[in-house]
Image (cartoon, helix red, strand yellow):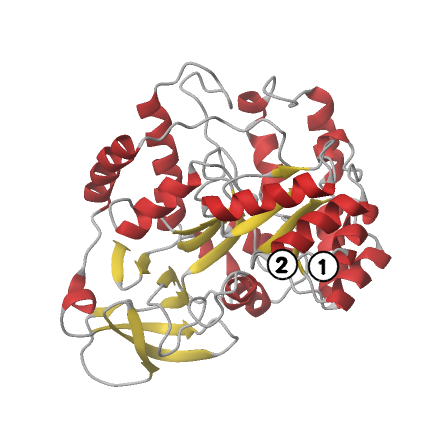
Amino acid sequence: MKTPFTASLAISGLAMLAFGITVFAQGGAQAGRGRNGAPITIRAAHVFDGKGGVIQNGVVEVQGSKIIAVDKREGPVTYDLGDATLLPGMIDVHVHLNWYFSSNGKYGGRGDTADYQTQAVLDNARKTLMAGFTTVQSLGAASDKPLRDAIAAGVVVGPRILTSISQIQGGTLTPDQLRERVRQAKAQGADVIKFFASGSIRDGGKMNVTQAQVDAVCGEAKAVGLRSLVHAHDPASIMASVKAGCTQIEHGLFADDASITAMKDANVYFDPNIGLVLQNYLWNKDHYLGSGNFNDEGFAAMERALPNLPVVFKKALDAGVRMPMGTDAVAGAHGENAREIIARVHAGQSTTGALIGATSLAAESLGLGTTIGTLAPGFEADIVAVPGDAIADITNVHRTTFVMKGGRIYKKN
């Protein structure tokens, strides 16, 4: 869905540090006994483990940054959250934290100060974490790297970030040049490679690269130990990406039965983005119109595409394709990520399946399936709570009341 244009963001180390300390202080993160002393215990009426299991009136025990027990027990606890559902910290495998609305209300507006740009991105990160998303994959801008590192250092409030740092377009680049671009991204600290094999919905979504170009990017990514995520809307671009051995297909709005079967047979991941990205563009049309290639024709194309989103998703679901939860969250959508989970249930997925897609399956797709996305001993203490029974009413995931990341509490209503 991205245009070649992305909002420029000049975050210097000093600016990031200064704003990060301010936002961190405002966020009110609590170290708690789980970080520095005795274990902390959290009880809720429903505990969903991320794999499909549910404990009624369960307790999660945390020591330091890790979960050390998940069970049923009597007696006092540190936090009794009552009639709530505990979940692993949710994961969004496709966001763009560098997208924001400028001071003039438009996307990509010019003239903003460096401080405004920094604060806007920090606000995106904070909103995402407070919505219960403790890990995201940001695809990708150079500004993601200092943001990732500042969050990891504990001076900025935000989710754990994996980033592509850049986005690779095929254009007129030769396979050798594309391989070099992959190696450069790796050297710059990228966690993943993002490549475009098709245009956006706004310009038809047709394949706009050669098989040799896709082969070069996905092959080199594998050679240097990185996953490859490919923006691919039409069957030709999907089939080419699967053939090239890519890790994950993004969007796939025009996927047909053959390309869905190809994804299933190759066991690649598919991130279809059905519940937020197009809707957000349309909700915020006035903010986007006139920026980059956002024009009336493009918005009309997005409106026409909306009915096809749940159709493609349900076909892929019925075929057994692995679909981790991603939103393609851009300006206006940060903090609204859980809408994607709700949309998946409305499109025919079980509530349990949708929650797995946003927790353990998403973690697996990131190569972190033994570290995050599950409530079990030895996993990171990324724990969120939502009111009531989220299995019975999936809309509850949009109302997060408790957020812990790595044993540190950031939200407790």
Could you tell me residue 393's position as x and y percent? 51, 62
Q: Amino acid at mark 1?
A: Gly
Q: Which residue is mark 1?
A: 245
Q: Amino acid at mark 2?
A: Lys
Q: CA distance from mark 1 to mark 2?
A: 9 Å
Q: Is residue 21 found left or right of 232 in the rendered image?
A: left
Callout 1: SS: loop
Mark 1 or mark 2, which is nearer to you?
A: 2
Mark 1 or mark 2: whose residue is earlier in sequence: 2
Q: Which residue is mark 2?
A: 222
Residue at 35%, 79% in the rendered image = 377
Picture layout, residue 193 above or below residue 295: below
Image quarter in which the N terminus is found:
top right
Q: Is residue 286 visible?
A: yes
Q: Residues within 10 Å of mark 2 (few under 14, many from 20)?
A: some
Q: Of 180 and 237, which appears nearest the observer?
A: 180
